[in-house]
Image: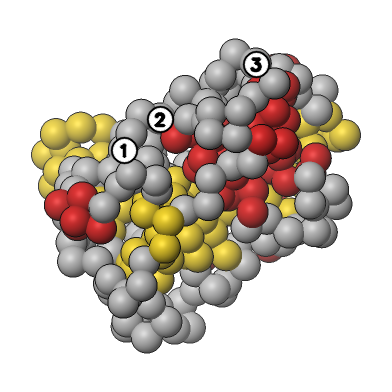
Amino acid sequence: MVEAADFTVGELMTCVFAHHLGEGELAIMGANSAIPMAACRLAQLTHAPSLSFIVGGSGAVNSLFEPMPASSCDAQNLRAECVLPLPDVIDVESRKIDVFFAGGLQIDKYGNCNLLGIGKPGELKFRGPGSVGLPFLSRARRFMIYTASHNKRTLVEKVDFISGPGFLDGKSYRGRIAGSGPALVVTPICVMDFDETTKSMRLKSTHPNVSVQQVRENTGFELVIPEKVTVTHVPTKHQVEILRKIDPGGIARNSVKA
């Protein structure tokens, strides 16, 4: 049996996302999405059995993976309720997604994500995989951002390229974003949301044994810090047991390091 305190940062992040998924919602994620995949399956097996999710470009709807595959593009995901062809996945992304899980090489204070590359146009220091499905973020009812690293290289004042639009510059987003925009950012050290007025990233909770100062020192912009910052709820014994049953190889569990 798993003790209540026996969890990894990856499992903590997974449980945070699972908590924010609801009954009847439709979620989608990209290729490198172990934590969102595990979060969706955990939500289905606990509080949101009618949640549905599309596993990236595979087109698999409600993949029944056990054990969890290494990638959302793995053929093992095709053991699912149904499999959509890519044109249908794109159609759904553009019109009907409740929750879109997103990430990036860079993420800025307004939740804009960059997957294209680091550097100036034509002078990239590092090339990423490209925008892929991130331009559809503005069509989702809301989206949640995850990153395996929390540092000033990843969380920047302004992204070099906007692959997926968050709140843009915090002022001109109205009328340009169909959904409600980014709702949550979960990193290995904290959970953040967005200030309702400025649309700037705001510290919501710190993970156990992480201080507000540590979060400040590792963030490349000035965070909104409320008067009271709580500690992130830790996974329950039951949640950890479920996660280790569906992910015995620890793909999600060991995907991030604090």
In the image: residue 138, left or right of residue 242 = left
Q: CA distance from mark 1 to mark 3?
A: 23 Å
SS under mark 1: loop
Q: Which residue position holds label 3?
A: 248
In the image: residue 236, left or right of residue 53 = left
At which x and y percent is residue 223?
Answer: 24, 66
**Three-letter amino acid code at the position of disc 3:** Pro
Quadrant holding the N terminus: top right
* Residue 24 visible in the picture: yes
Answer yes or no: do the residues labelled 3 and 2 have beta carbons within 8 Å?
A: no
- Give the residue drawn at x 67%, y 61%: 98
At which x and y percent is residue 41?
Answer: 73, 37
Q: Is residue 27 above or below residue 170?
A: above
Mark 1 or 3, closer to the camera = 3
Question: In this orientation, which residue lies closer to the viewer: 70 or 234?
Answer: 234
At which x and y percent is residue 241?
Answer: 70, 28
Q: Which residue position holds label 1?
A: 149
Mark 2 Cα-neighbour bin, 10 Å: few <14, some 14–19, many ≥20: some
Q: Which comes sooner in the sequence, label 2 or label 1?
A: 1
SS under mark 3: loop
Q: Which comes sooner in the sequence, label 3 or label 2?
A: 3
In the image: residue 7, left or right of residue 91 = left
Which residue is the extreme one toward the top? 249
* Residue 134 visible in the picture: no
- Give the residue drawn at x 72%, y 36%: 238
**Three-letter amino acid code at the position of disc 1:** Ser
Answer yes or no: do the residues labelled 2 and 1 have beta carbons within 8 Å?
A: yes
Q: Which residue position holds label 2?
A: 256
**Three-letter amino acid code at the position of disc 2:** Val
Q: Is residue 168 above or below residue 231?
A: below
Q: CA distance from mark 3 to mark 2?
A: 16 Å
